[in-house]
Amino acid sequence: MIAFITGATAGIGKSTAEIFAKNGYNLIITGRRKDRLEAFSKQLKDSYKIDVLSLNFDVRNLKEVQEAVKSIPENWKKINVLVNNAGLAVGLNSIQDGVTDDWDRMIDTNIKGLLYMTRTLVPLMTANGFGHIVNLGSIAGKEVYANGNVYCATKHAVDALSKSMRIDLLPHHIKVTAIHPGMVETEFSIVRFKGDEEKAKNVYKGVQPLTPDDIAETIYWTASRPSHVNINDVIIMPTIQASATTVLRN
């Protein structure tokens, strides 16, 4: 069994790689930070005695995506699961004060990156006659909140794309699942606030958010259902969160 996981060097992607490895999957992991990618690849091989293929590229760059997938050896092409995990939020500005570079970065990663990976890998899955795509969405793809504008729009796009992929890929026996987490403590807020660790800490102050392991366990659970079962959509929240903006703090 082979799982292909994007954005695997930190957070949810890293935890997802570990749980699949623990369950005997060989892994294709991707990331932009080559040093982290190589170190994590070695750790996975040593800890779980599995095979790991690491691919260093940026999902935002179509040419890099195509070249990376083209480089996959024949014996790695029977991919069972693709986890489109790479994604981010940048900035928290009102629409009239939005930074267009931030918008481009979110759109290029969260929407176009997911599309590039899917378009490039699905032909392998259709040739194999099986596969499962897991797309990482967000509660921001189900609701909107003040100053979330473009990030919310990108995650609404992930929700819509997951639904349409499921229809398009039905004749090819390829499952599609969307996972929509609420608050998860990862590098997410540090990236959103452009390295301001104090601001990032305040997001999780007085709450117990989800962990990357919580989401990874959910992803693995959806991927481990019998072949006749597809989990279409999962919204997973910490107990202290009722909606995108309703959070119980101590």
Image (cartoon, grey):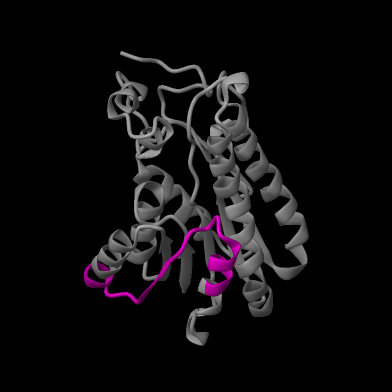
Question: Which is nearer the eye, 94 or 74?
Answer: 94
Which image quadrant is residue 188 in?
Answer: top left
> Which x, y percent locates residue 81?
53, 65
Report the residue that reaches farthest toward the bottom: 74
> Which x, y percent locates residue 90?
48, 35
> Which x, y percent locates residue 4?
48, 66
Which image quadrant is residue 129 in?
Answer: bottom right
Instruction: Tell me if residue 230 can be seen.
Output: no
Q: Residue at 67% across / 73% down in the picture? A: 123
Whether residue 132 is situated above or below residue 208 in the rendered picture: below
Question: Which is nearer the eye, 155 or 2?
Answer: 155
Q: Residue at 57% across / 31% down in the picture? A: 140
Where does the C terminus fall, quadrant-wise? top left
Question: Which is nearer the eye, 150 or 229?
Answer: 150
The reply, left or right, for residue 89 in relation to residue 184 is right
> Which x, y percent locates residue 27?
41, 70
Whether residue 36 is situated above or below residue 140 in the rendered picture: below
Indicate yes or no whether the magenta region holds residue 59.
yes
Q: Residue at 57% across / 26% down in the picture? A: 98
Q: How many marks?
A: 0
Instruction: Tell me if residue 68 can be seen.
Output: yes
Report the residue that reaches farthest toward the top: 250
Whether residue 191 is situated above or below residue 144 in the rendered picture: below
Q: Residue at 54% across / 70% down in the picture? A: 80
- Magenta region: which residues? 45-67
Which image quadrant is residue 158 in?
Answer: top right
Indicate yes or no whether the magenta region holds residue 115.
no
